[in-house]
Image: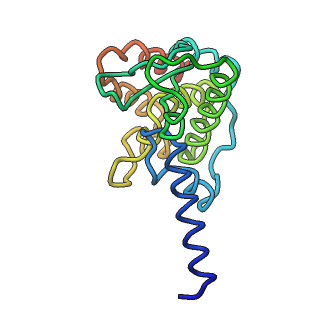
């Protein structure tokens, strides 16, 4: 192997490690920044509306303290539904207070990532409300909304990309685990259908 090839492998490896450390645990390596850069952003090219942003903020709530999102100690959350990445955990621990500027930065980054997922995977035209509802779901679920662990399309993505918007609306309710999230999904389904 040449020196140039070794350097390239080191750079790609370092980038992948950074990519992993800065992504939500819900996204995994296969749906991180490196994949975004290699594959390019394709699809709709839509932006979330102010109403969509407000709906996500209302659904998520905001906490200035780091807390456990569920029973797993690994799932630390803060801000507006921001699941702390391995890199975030170097600066913040359970119970820490997070500055408002950091909360805003995380939220803007998380919204952009969720919108990029919808733009990347959905190929059929969407109304603004449909797009906003899907961004809300992607914000909450990450890349698993569109891709199964084996890389195949989820039922909601298959319905969306075949133009079956009524079927896609029905598949929103496939994502009600835990049951406490049912009201959120009903709100996203209503938003999608309006």
Location of residue 23 with respect to 193 vertically, above or below: below
Q: How is the image coloured?
A: rainbow
Identified at 47% across, 40% down, the residue is 86
Q: Residue 165's spot in the image, x, y percent?
A: 48, 33
Relative placement, left or right, of 108 versus 90 is: right
Q: Residue 100's spot in the image, x, y percent?
A: 67, 17
Q: Tell me where residue 186 sits by quadrant.
A: top left
User: For the view shown, which residue lies furthest in the bottom direction?
Assistant: 2
Q: Residue 34's spot in the image, x, y percent?
A: 57, 57
Q: Nearer the viewer, residue 152 or 141?
A: 141
Q: Nearer the viewer, residue 45 or 74?
A: 74
Q: Tell me where residue 178 sits by quadrant.
A: top left
Location of residue 158 with respect to 49 vertically, above or below: below
The quadrant of the rendering that contains the C terminus is top right
Q: Nearer the viewer, residue 70 or 54?
A: 70
Q: Residue 57's spot in the image, x, y percent?
A: 58, 16
Q: Nearer the viewer, residue 106 or 114?
A: 106
Identified at 38% across, 44% down, the residue is 154
Identified at 60% across, 24% down, the residue is 129
């Amino acid at each position: 192997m040449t020196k140039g090839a070794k350097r390239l492998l080191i750079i790609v490896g370092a980038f992948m490690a950074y990519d992993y450390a800065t992504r939500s645990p819900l996204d995994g390596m296969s749906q991180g920044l490196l994949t975004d850069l290699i594959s390019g952003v394709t699809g709709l090219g839509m932006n979330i509306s102010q109403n969509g942003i407000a709906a996500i903020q209302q659904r998520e709530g905001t906490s200035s303290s780091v807390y456990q999102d569920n029973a797993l100690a690994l799932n630390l959350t803060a801000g507006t539904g921001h699941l702390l990445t391995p890199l975030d955990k170097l600066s913040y621990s359970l119970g820490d207070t997070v500055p408002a500027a950091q909360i805003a930065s995380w939220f803007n980054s998380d919204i952009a990532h969720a919108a990029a997922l919808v733009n990347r995977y959905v190929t059929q035209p969407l109304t603004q409300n449909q797009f906003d509802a899907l961004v809300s779901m992607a914000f909450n679920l990450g890349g698993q909304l569109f891709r199964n662990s084996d890389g195949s399309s989820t039922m909601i993505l298959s319905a969306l990309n075949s133009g079956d918007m009524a079927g896609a609306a029905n598949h929103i309710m496939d994502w009600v685990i835990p049951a406490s999230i049912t009201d959120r999904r009903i709100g996203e389904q209503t938003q999608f259908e309006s």
